[in-house]
Image (cartoon, rainbow, N blue to C red):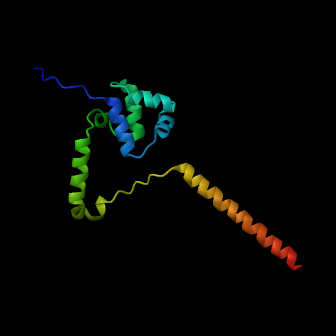
Amino acid sequence: MSTATKPKHIGRNISRIRELKGIKQEALAIAIGVSQQYVSTLEGSETIEETKLAEIAKALGVTIEAIENFSEESVFNFFNNFHDHSSINGAQGINNNCIFNPLDKVIELYERLVQAEKDKVEYLEKLLKGK
């Protein structure tokens, strides 16, 4: 009976880290300068060349070693320990990273600008009727 360990699936690790960080394939693709389809192919690959892995690690904000040694069990242990000690650390345990979709912010700004223009038109029409 063989006790050889199965090699880590680097693509699957990238996929899980990306999902845990709330990053879409499209966003990762833009960050490393490839297409979304290429990211999908990478996530299906057991091995990835070192230079591409370094780019991906940088885009995800992790180390290459974190990708290579990723396991869901270690993530759960980290979060359990973090939660268990959060009252000890006080304010230091607060995560100040803000993750949002920039496109949503652009749309929100655009809608506010359109509403401001509508308000101006309404105000000017009232002024014209008042004369």
Question: Which quadrant does the C terminus fall into?
Answer: bottom right
> 115 above or below 8?
below
Specify the farthest residue to the top.
1
User: Viewed as shown, does residue 10 lie left or right of 100?
Assistant: left
> Hey, which quadrant is residue 75 in on the image?
top left
In the rendered image, the vertical position of residue 32 relative to residue 124, given as above or below: above
What residue do we see at 51% from left, 36% from top? 30
Q: Residue at x 26, y 64 (%)?
A: 90
Q: Residue 100, image x and y in percent?
A: 48, 52
In the picture as drawn, the residue positioned furthest to the right comes out as 131
> Looking at the image, which residue sits at the far bottom?
130
In the rendered structure, the answer to whether residue 71 lies left or right of residue 109 reads left
Residue 48: quarter of image = top left
**Identity of the residue drawn at 49% across and 40% down:** 27
- Above or below for 82 versus 37: below
Q: Quadrant of the N terminus?
A: top left
| Residue sticking out furthest to the front | 1
How many numbered discs sit on the rendered protein? 0
- Residue nearest the observer in this picture, 2 or 31: 2
- Report x, y in % for residue 41: 43, 27
Residue 47: x %, y % from top left: 33, 24
Q: Could you say which quadrant of the image residue 113 lies in?
A: bottom right
* Residue located 39% across and 31% down the image: 43
